[in-house]
């Protein structure tokens, strides 16, 4: 707001430059001396409204007819508040051109007062923001479509979870009974091999389905952690025990080096087990016969460090940035020779981050891989939003090195 008196207009060159600038920016200006009926419009404002200065003279009544009915009350209320409260204003509304096109415009207005302190002029700029508003509408529609697709996918996977898991569990259960010949011999020895194949295939398919469902829950933000006090050594030893049969079949030795067997952390037991199982399973899968896998666990000042080290085939340098993406395979030459959904590392990474930790992978082809998992002692500190100074980009970051 300021005191304004009529002055001589700008020079022709200045006026031409101003008109060109407004045309480029799609910004027009207007000026209304309140003791006059007509309102001054710039050339660009006529273009925004789709009108011709030779045939249209702006007045309050004529401008009202250009404004969309739903926006007219808001616009007039804005002008009235500006005059009564002697305040500047900023509003958006829709103009309808004579050809029916709708333009979204942003109006920024100012007031001027006379020597008596009364508002005697209104002036401002109008910018055509149609492209921005339409892009926002498109983005909103795209988000709504994405949300609907996510909801449909989640519903589909939830339904398929029941429909697939139920018969698969039956297949696995009955094949185990037949494999053990609980109700008598099968007869031909080949039948036992076939039944074993059925069981292993069923278990593999069930693992794939579980991975896909877990990844879907994580992506949808519906994976809930159940934090409890966990003895880390117990979980590590349990994971090693689960993998012992597979590692022995592959001729691979697994050894553990746990610095402190009594270390307790607050974490999701199932999630922690799945993290270690996925990483250890990958290590076994990509380590040759007579290979060695070492699981190390160290207490650090701010976090727990777990390392899973193998002397397997390793990961090419150009693949390292992508191995924790869903459905990624590290080495194309091994894709068909090693079964899996390609979700194991992606799920582990997401679960670690849900706890407020992170994963780091070092690897060299034909030399092996080191997967380092860093977890806070108490995942609730991250979940409850504590230790804000250690949060960067929404993830818990550890200041000290490995």
Image: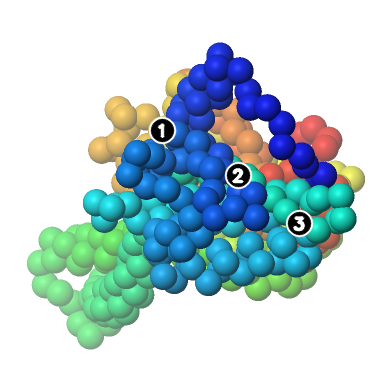
Horizontal and vertical percent position of residue 150: 38, 64
Q: Is residue 30 left or right of residue 68?
A: right
The C terminus, quarter of image: top right
Pointer 1 or 2: first along the chain = 2
Considering depth in this image, is 253 or 166 the residue closer to the camera?
Answer: 166
Residue 330 is labelled as: 1
Helix, strand or loop under label 2: strand
Q: Could you say which disc has been placed on residue 31 in the image?
A: 2
Residue ID at (48%, 22%): 20
Could you tell me which residue is drawn at 18 percent across and 77 percent down? 185
Residue farthest bottom in this picture: 183
**Vertical position of residue 192 compared to residue 113: above or below:** below
Return the disc, 2 or 3, that comes first in the chain's sequence: 2
Q: Is residue 224 above or below residue 21?
A: below
Residue 278 located left or right of residue 392:
left
**Whole-percent x and y of residue 252?**
49, 40
Determine which residue is flagged by label 3. 119
């Amino acid at each position: 707001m300021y005191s304004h008196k009529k002055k001589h207009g700008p020079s022709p060159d200045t006026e031409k430059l101003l008109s060109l600038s407004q045309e480029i920016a799609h910004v027009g200006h207007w000026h209304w001396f309140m003791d006059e009926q007509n309102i001054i419009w710039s050339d660009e404002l006529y273009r925004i409204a789709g009108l011709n200065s030779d045939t249209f003279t702006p007045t309050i009544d004529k401008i009202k007819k250009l404004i969309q009915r739903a926006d007219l009350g808001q616009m007039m209320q804005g002008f009235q508040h500006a005059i009564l409260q002697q305040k500047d204003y900023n509003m958006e509304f829709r103009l309808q051109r004579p050809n029916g096109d709708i333009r979204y415009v942003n109006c920024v207005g100012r007031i001027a007062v006379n020597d008596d302190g009364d508002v005697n002029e209104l002036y401002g700029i109008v910018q055509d923001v149609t492209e921005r508003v339409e892009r926002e509408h498109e983005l909103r529609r795209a988000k709504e479509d994405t949300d609907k697709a996510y909801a449909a996918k989640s519903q589909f996977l939830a339904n398929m979870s029941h429909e697939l898991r139920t018969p698969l569990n039956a297949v696995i259960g009955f094949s185990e009974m037949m494999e053990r010949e609980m109700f008598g011999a099968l007869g031909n020895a080949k039948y036992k091999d076939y039944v074993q194949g059925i069981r292993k295939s069923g278990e593999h398919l069930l693992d794939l389905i579980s991975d896909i469902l877990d990844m879907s829950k994580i992506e949808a933000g519906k994976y809930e952690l159940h934090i409890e006090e966990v003895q880390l050594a117990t979980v590590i030893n349990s994971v090693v025990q689960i993998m012992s049969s597979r590692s022995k079949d592959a001729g691979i030795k697994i050894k553990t080096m746990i610095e402190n067997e009594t270390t307790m952390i607050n974490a999701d037991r199932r999630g922690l087990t799945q993290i270690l199982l996925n990483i250890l399973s990958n290590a076994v899968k990509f380590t040759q016969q007579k290979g060695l896998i070492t699981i190390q666990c160290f207490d650090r000042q701010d976090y727990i460090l777990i390392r899973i080290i193998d002397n397997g085939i390793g990961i090419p340098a150009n693949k390292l940035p992508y191995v924790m993406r869903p459905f990624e395979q590290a080495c194309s030459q091994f894709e068909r020779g090693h079964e899996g959904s390609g979700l194991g590392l992606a799920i582990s990474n997401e679960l670690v981050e849900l706890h407020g930790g992170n994963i780091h992978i070092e690897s060299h082809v034909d030399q092996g891989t080191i997967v380092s998992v860093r977890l806070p002692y108490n995942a609730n500190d991250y979940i409850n939003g504590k230790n804000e100074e250690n949060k960067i980009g929404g993830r818990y970051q550890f200041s000290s090195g490995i």
